[in-house]
Image (spheres, coloured by chain):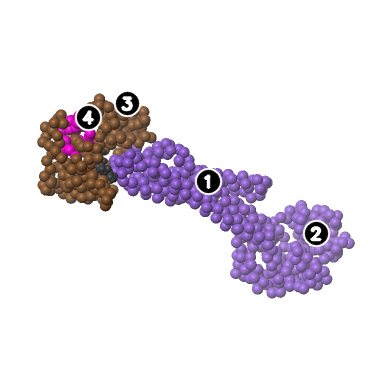
Amino acid sequence: MNLSDIVFRNLLRRKAKALFVLAGLAIGVATVVALISFVEAMTNHINHKLEKYGANILIVPKTENLSLSYGGLSLGGVSFEMQEIRQRDLQKIDSIKNAANVAGIGPMVFGVVTVRGQKVLLAGVDFESTWILKPWWKIDGTLPGETGVILGAETAKVLDLKRGSSLQIKKKDFIVSGVLKPTGSQDDQLLFMTLGTAQSILNKEGLISMAEVAALCKDCPIDAMVKQISEAVPGARVMAIQQVVKGRMEALSQFKNFSYGVSLVVVLVGSLVVLATMMGSVRERTEEIGIFRAIGFRKSHVFKIVLLEAGFISAVAGILGYVAGFGVTKGVLQFFYESGGASILPSVNLAAGALGLAVLVGLASSIYPAFLAARMDPNQALSAM
Amino acid sequence: MSYVCAEHLVKTYGTGAAAVRAVHDVNFDIEAGEFVSIMGESGAGKSTLLSIMGAMNPPTSGRFVVNDIDVYKLGSEKRTDFRREFIGFVFQSFHLASYLTVLENVMLPLTTVPTSRKEKRSLAEAALAQVGLSGKEGRLPSQISGGEKERVAIARAIVNDPPVVLADEPTGNLDSKTSHEIMALLQRLNRAGTTILMVTHSRDCAGYAERSLMVTDGRLTEPDRDLLRVGNDLPFQPEPQDLCSDARYG
Ligand SMILES: Nc1ncnc2c1ncn2[C@@H]1O[C@H](COP(=O)(O)OP(=O)(O)O)[C@@H](O)[C@H]1O
Ligand SMILES: [Mg+2]
């Protein structure tokens, strides 16, 4: 027989009350866990998309003519008199303040060439950076060497070329080393070759038409980086292309604030449930506490009994709340993102946090009832019986 | 000096017009091993006096000393420890915890004592054997008779072997046959060395005590000797000035 025996025997006796406290806390914890893990899943989902998005900064020449475009961006006039950026100027990006956040730079050169009697937009790219800049690319074939090209899906269809076909561009022979699977972007209508080859074919040695920059981090200061790059690369217009994702991030952060508010209210209600129930329980146990005090339980012992009881229920509520909150989020995410969109994994940190939150709220709400119980005058408690 | 010593005890409940003086300048002393009954009419102040002796009810003025310890000079938690070590209570209405078994109820006073479960258990079993309740350890209070509840209450009072047992109308809720059994039990305890102070309405019960204190309107008065069956002691005659004169202040 020790204090915890008394606690457990009492809990068993007052199952309904214990369950009430348990439910109050568990619902609160479950709500908090569900909201937090939902926000987390969404954030991960968006970040994941963000990374899949590839390039998020474009460097293009400053130009007044707006007609040929790539990715919604002007590449200068059709007149092929596009202004260009010197390729070596791109090296200056390595020395900007946030250089560490730059995951990849993809210089590109554009020009119109005639293939099989059709005008095609030729893009010279640095294939080594495509995996990070264009992660959605799926090539049916291999990356091209100096005499190879890759065709956009549309280009391949229009020109009636496939992997292994040969073709002539400006009297030079090339082999189709691969065909891009449809991307749904303008890449489908391009013809790609290595940057160097394209530069020499287009007589643009050392020049590039634009460059894509990938800043692949969650909280990159994109705007600051845009500014730094504009300063570093003369004659270039630098812009961020993240409007859609940014908008979603903003919506998410609003939802985050909303869920913090809801969590606070739910936890507050939970703690009031605990407070009211524990007060009632202490009042009901007046006689018992009177006996305890009379036969030599110190005030601190009585205090401990009440807090142990609250602490035990709270710990159970924390665990149940975590499991319930996790389950709800999992279910909701599965409902909204049927095939492998956003998802969550059990988190030890969140579980520990849920446990801690429940115990903290449970104990904090029981301090006053415990204090009242401890302060009870045994003589009055017993003579009132 | 005496083992238990009350000096000018006064207890007033409430203040102003509503003040009730429940105990009025009470003085007595009791030797270790005595069996004393406290008699008086309802409302005379017996329970108040007993609760003061039980270190549960600070007197408005006066001193109460046990074993040279000035009980009400102790801080609240120390006074609790004193209760645990020195006093066993037998309450009028048993005051058993309904959700604990007989054995667990008896073990209650040992809860905060740092000994092993096994030791606590065997102490409780010994106490139950002493009151003749062996074999009923696992029952709940609702599953035993009134007389048995009283025995459980006594077992709980003696489980940690306190030098003093205080009983407030221990037979108040029992029939006369059971009352006599309980009295015989208390007498046995007393013969084994426990000092017993017992409040009672019943002259029969008071007869088991070695002497009797009479309380009338909060004051000690001379008991009517004819009312006592066993009363070889002189009626208590307090001499206030001399009481507890050499008590150490604890
Ligand atoms: N806690 C209390 N508050 C106020 N008055 C009390 C309290 N306890 C007892 N009294 C009063 O003190 C007087 C003595 O009561 P009590 O000691 O219970 O007498 P007894 O046990 O002899 O019946 C009574 O008038 C009673 O109403
Ligand atoms: Mg009384």
| Residue placed under numbered mark 4 in the picture | B183
Q: Amino acid at mark 3?
A: Gly
**Quadrant assignment for ligand 2:** top left
Mark nearer the viewer, 1 or 4: 4
As displayed, is residue B118 above or below residue A311?
A: above
Residue B155 is left or right of residue A247, and the answer is left
Question: Can the viewer see residue B129 in this picture?
Answer: no
Inspect the image, locate mark 2, and give the three-letter code of the amino acid beneath it: Gln
Label 3 or label 4, whichever lies nearer to me, is 4
State left or right for residue A151 relative to residue A270.
Answer: right
Residue assigned mark 1: A27
Quadrant hosting residue B97: top left
In the picture, which quadrant includes the N terminus of chain A? Answer: top left
Q: Is residue B1 visible?
A: yes
* Within-10-Å neighbours for mark 4: few <14, some 14–19, many 20+: many
Image mark for residue B135:
3
Same chain letter for marks 3 and 4? yes
Q: Residue at x 40, y 38 (%)?
A: A10
Q: Secondary structure at mark 2?
A: helix
Q: Chain of mark 1?
A: A
Chain letter, disc 4 residue: B
